[in-house]
Image: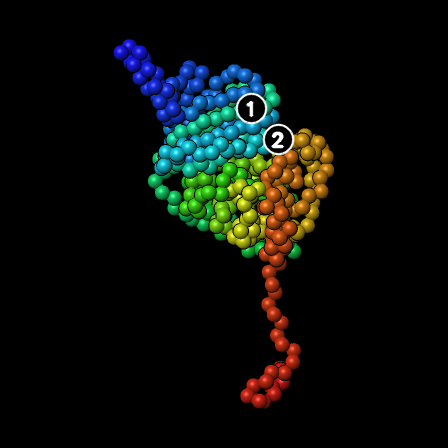
Amino acid sequence: MTRLLLHTAVATALAAGTLGLSQPARTSSDTASSSDGVHTVRVPDGDPHERSLDPRTTEPFSMIGVTWDDPEAALDGTAQVRTRSRESGEWSAWRALDTDVRTPETGPDRDRAGGRGGTQPLWTGPSDGVQVRVSGGRLPEGLRVELVDPDGGWDAVHTTVVEPDVAGPAAGAPAAERPAVTSRAGWGADESLVKDPPTYTTGTQALFVHHTAGTNDYTCAESASIVRGVFLYHVRSNGWNDIGYHFLVDKCGTVFEGRAGGIDKPVLGAHTYGFNTATSSISVLGDYGRTTANTAVRESVAKVAAWKLGLYGIDPTGTVVLTAGADNGKYKAGQKATLHRISGHRDGYPTECPGQHLYDDLPEIRTLAGKAAKPDEPSPEPAGPVIEDDVTVALAR
C-alpha cells in the first residue's frame, strides 16, 4: 500500500511537472515586476555562457524581448523564446530574437538614466506563458524578459490622419505628394511616457529602411497594437525617450507616425547606430528575410521617402556622403560613407535588417520614389490640325 501511494505520488508529481509549463515554482532570483504595459521577469544568474527561464504562466502579453543592464554591451550569442497562446493554449516553436539593437550614439536616448541593452522585440499575439534560453560568449549581466501588453487598458484604436504644419519644399525641390499618415494619437501613443522634448538636427539627408523582424503572422487590424508595443518596448524596456523610428508601415501599406516632433521636421531618431544624425527612418512591420514585400509596402516606403527627402530638395534616387558618428562594427567614427539616399539598415550597420527580400526591393523603391518626386507634367496641347465632322479646323495661333 505504501509502495502504491509512493508510486502514485511520484506519478502525480511528474504530471504536475509536465503541466507545470503553466505554473512552475518560482525562486527569489526570478522576481517579476510590471509598469505601464510592460511586465518583466528576471532570468536567473548562473553559467556565464548559458542562461534560461523555465516555462511558466505570466501576465498577458503580445510582444516579447530580452534586455540586460549595460546599454553598451552586445549579446554575443543567441536568445530564443517560445510562448503559449492565450487562445489555444498551445506552445509555439522556439523562435530567435534579433540582437542588432544598439543605444543611439548621441541625444537624449543615450543620456537618459536607466538605459538597457536589448534584443529586437518579437510580436507573438495574445500570450500568457513563456520559456527562454540565452547562450553564447560571456553573457551580459542582468538579463530579463520583457513582456509587453500594448492593449492593457486600451479600449479602441481610432485611426486619424496627421495634418502637421508642413514647411514648403525648398526652391527647386521635387514636389512629391505628402502621404497619408496615421498619427500618434491614432495608434495610441501614451505621451506621458515621453519625458524629454524631441531633439532636432540640421536636416534630413537620407532615409534608412528597416523591418521589425519577428513575424508576418499578424492582421492589419493589429498593426496599431504592434506599433504601441514597439513604442512601449523602446521606452520602458530599452529606456529610450521615445520610439526609435520616424515612420512605420504595415503589410497593407498603412503608414504610422513614429517619433514625436513633427513628421516634416528633422527629428533625431534612434534607428541606425552611427548614422542617426541628419537621417530619417521607416520600419516595415514583419520579417522580410523570409517573406517578400508586397506592392503596397514598396509603394508606401517610396512615397514617404520621396516626400520626406523632397522637403530638402533632395532627389531620392541619388547618393550622399555621410560621416559615421561612432564605431559600429561596419564603420569607424569619423569615417566617410557613400550611401544611397534610400538605404537599408545594413548599409550603415552590420545587420541583416531589413531582410534580404526587402533589401533586394530597394532599387525598385528608389525608382518609385523618383517617379513620386517628379509628378508627370500635363500633356502638351496637340500641335496639328483637329478633325471635327470631316472638317479640318486650323488651331488658333
Q: Position of residue 136 (x, y in %)?
A: 59, 24
- Other-residue count near label 1 (Cα within 10 Å), few / some / many at <14 / 14–19 / ≥20: some
**How far is disc 1 from disc 2 in space, using C-alphas?**
27 Å
In front of the other: 260 or 94: 94
The x, y position of residue 318, in whole percent, is: 68, 50
Q: First in sequence, mark 1 or 2: give its number.
A: 2
Residue 42 visible at all: yes
Give the mark toward the camera: 1 or 2.
1
Which amino acid type corresponds to the residue marked 1 in the rendered image? Ser
> In the image, is 11 to the left or to the right of 218?
left
| Count of numbered labels shown in the rendering | 2
Image quadrant in which you'd find residue 270: top right
Circle 1 sits in a helix, a strand or a loop, which is it? strand
Q: On residue 105, which mark appears?
A: 2
Amino acid found under the numbered disc labelled 2 = Glu
| Residue toward you, 206 or 172 | 206
Q: Quadrant of the C terminus?
A: bottom right
- Residue 261 seen: no
Q: Residue at x 45, y 50 (%)?
A: 161
